[in-house]
Amino acid sequence: MLKQECWLMRSTRLKKCNKVATTTFMLMISLFCLLGCSDPKNEQALSQVKRITKEYDKKTTESGVYIRASEGELKEKDPWGTPLVLSYSQGGVAEMVTVTSAGRDKTFHTADDVEAQGIAVNFKGAGEGIKKNIEETSANAAKGFVKGAVKGVKESIKESLPFKKKKKDVEEKDGEAAEAETKAREDG
């Protein structure tokens, strides 16, 4: 009887160990598939929507507003044969362009949708005003620089002319003579 009880206990422990090992193995396989076994069509769709988003993200005015695509301009289909959707949205000074694939289930607004977004900051009329003010400010700064440079050149030319030096020398000599006369008077 003792042998039979030991065998039952071992059997129960083995069953528990097998359940734990099986559960762990299944979790590892699931995790591996989630991380490494992605659908090639899904990766292809992601690459496709990213590429198209980049194309449309570059199409902006000088002030940063998207140049909207005409309806039906985007004719590409995702790897499952569903037409891609191009949409624009705006919030404050940010504007977004989004390209969406319906995904494997071919139904939009579900968990398997694949999308990419581009964002642009726009100032609608302010962009031109800012550009004009920058141009005006830089022009004024350049004028100030030129005026300062001209004034500096004039001063250096005046100082380097010989007749100015002679005049300065005379003034200095006259100043020294006047000091000597004043000293003589004070002493005398």
Image (cartoon, rainbow, N blue to C red):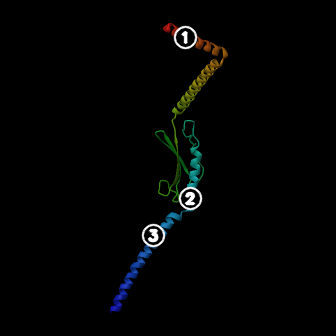
What residue appears at the point 59 percent right and 51 percent down from the top-left corner? 51
Query: From what the image shows, is residue 154 above or below residue 122?
Result: above
Nearer the viewer's eye, disc 2 or disc 1?
Answer: 1
Q: Is residue 81 visible?
A: no
Closer to the camera, 139 or 81? 139
Q: 129 or 69, which lies in front?
A: 129
Q: Which mark is residue 180?
A: 1
Circles 1 and 3: CB atoms closer than 8 Å: no
Residue 128 percent coordinates (x, y): 55, 31
Q: Residue 26, how many percent across, how many down?
A: 46, 72
Q: Residue furthest bottom?
A: 1
Residue at 55% from the left image edge and 62% from the top image edge: 39
- Percent position of residue 149, x then y: 61, 24
Q: Is residue 66 left or right of residue 11?
A: right
Image quadrant holding the N terminus, namely: bottom left
Q: Which residue is mark 3?
A: 27
From where the camera sits, is residue 47 visible? yes
**Residue 60, picture quadrant:** top right
User: Does the CB distance between marks 2 and 1 fall below 8 Å?
Assistant: no
Disc number placed over residue 124 in the picture, else none: none
* Disc 3/disc 2 C-alpha distance (Å): 24 Å
Which residue, as the protein is rendered here, is positioned at the far front? Answer: 188
Which mark, residue 43?
2
Helix, strand or loop for disc 2: helix
Q: Looking at the image, is mark 3 or mark 2 nearer the viewer?
A: 3
How far apart are the alpha carbons under marks 1 and 3?
A: 108 Å
Classed neighbour count for the residue bearing mark 3: other residues with Cα under 10 Å, few (<14), some (14–19), many (≥20):
few
Q: Secondary structure at mark 1?
A: helix
Disc with the residue nearer the chain's start (3 vs 2): 3
* Residue type at tag 1: Ala
Q: Amino acid at mark 2?
A: Glu
Q: CA distance from mark 2 to mark 1?
A: 99 Å
